[in-house]
Image (cartoon, grey):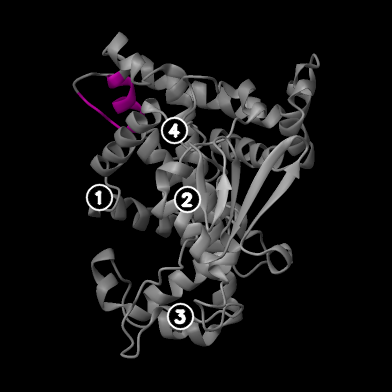
Amino acid sequence: QLQKKFGNVFSLQNFWNNVVVLNGYKAVKEALVTRAEDYADRPYVPVYEHMGYGKNSQGIVMARYRHIWKELRKFTLSTLRNFGMGKESLEKRVVEEARFLCSAVNSEEGRPFDLRFLVNNAVCNVICTTVYGERFNYGDETFKKLLHLFDQFLQEETGLLTQFLNSVPIFLHIPGLVDKVFPGQKSFMEFIDVLIERHMKTWNPAYTRDFTDAFVKEMKKGKEAEERGFTYNNLRLVTADLFGAGTETTATTLRWAILYMVLHPEIQSKSEKGRKPSIKDQASMPYTNAVIHEVQRCGDIVPTGILHMTYRDTELQGFFIPKGTTIITNLSSVLKDESFWEKPHEFYPEHFLDAKGQFVKREAFLPFSAGR
């Protein structure tokens, strides 16, 4: 409604903070792709301080655009690739976990149950094997605790009180308030500490088991590594980022996929013909690929993406935007942009197929944002 009234670029006042909202593909692309570095920074989030975020300890997702972020991002992408991201070795783990998930679903024998927990279990296990080198049974009490704390963490992060405290952070100094308002976040980070400390006790420099081991190996290089951001606090924050970004987004997307297949059985039937596919079959399965992309477009699970902040004075579509301005990218307006999608408000896999039925990725497909 605000977009229709004020256009694709407008500002809001959040207490004493000026916020600029970007709508539609063209505005978002200009900011995050064409002028990527201008919009690469992140705003200060006061409520994260109690989890260990500080000047040089910021993880990756909410880190300021500085040399430490560049170092950690480069290391993280390289290490994840080494442990199979986008490769056959990771696919084997995903397929194995899918079998466990299907087995757990079948064990319900047609009774009503909440699919959310089983899907979260499966996705979380894939992340855990890569980051912490561990896979948990679905009934494992430690695993249940981890998922419960993460769920509580997310609920606390998105609450109205959290937004208020971010805007008026002086209230965070009230004795005991943080522990009372964010018990899940505190407990989740303490649990991350337990997993890391268990790793460090059995760490062997000659054998790198997982992402955590690789990070510890960098930490052991001393002062030079510390200046590049390889500290214990960044280890806990980066692994928490990987856990959060990898688990919730994938699990929510899978639940949307299941819902859309229930609502559109004819599409499900067309997608599942033939044998169980592997990643090598992707190029020869254009319709299934289109369905997956349409699930992400319609699911729209990160409607405003991650907050950005201008790194320097810049402009956008004729508007001057000063350094330090918080930027909200309305990704929903991109995924439903009527100038780019034939049926923006319908589940229509043909959005990603050309006239010959071959898969084509659309430029306005930005379910998880773009740029830095």
Which numbered dot is residue 189?
Answer: none
Marks 3 and 4, how far apart at CA: 35 Å
For marks 1 and 4 on the same chain, the one whose residue lies earlier in the sequence:
4
Q: Residues within 10 Å of mark 1 (few under 14, many from 20)?
A: few
Amino acid type, residue under disc 3 in the picture: His
- Outermost residue, top direction? 223
Amino acid type, residue under disc 4 in the picture: Tyr
For marks 2 and 4 on the same chain, the one whose residue lies earlier in the sequence:
4
Q: Main secondary structure of the magenta part?
A: helix
Which numbered dot is residue 351?
Answer: 3
Quadrant of the snapshot with the C terminus: top left
Q: Is residue 31 visible?
A: yes
Q: Are marks 3 and 4 in contact (CB under 8 Å)?
A: no
Which numbered dot is residue 123?
Answer: 2
> Is residue 107 magenta-colored?
no
Marks 2 and 3, how far apart at CA: 27 Å
Give the percent coordinates (x, y) of residue 295. Answer: 51, 70
For marks 2 and 3 on the same chain, the one whose residue lies earlier in the sequence:
2
Q: Are marks 1 and 4 in contact (CB under 8 Å)?
A: no
SS type, badge 4: loop
Which numbered dot is residue 65?
Answer: 4
Give the percent coordinates (x, y) of residue 121. Answer: 52, 48
Q: Which residues are magenta?
A: 207-218
For marks 3 and 4 on the same chain, the one whose residue lies earlier in the sequence:
4
Camera-nearest label, 1 or 4: 4
Give the percent coordinates (x, y) of residue 248. Answer: 54, 49
Camera-nearest label, 2 or 3: 3
Marks 1 and 3, how far apart at CA: 31 Å
Amino acid type, residue under disc 1 in the picture: Ser
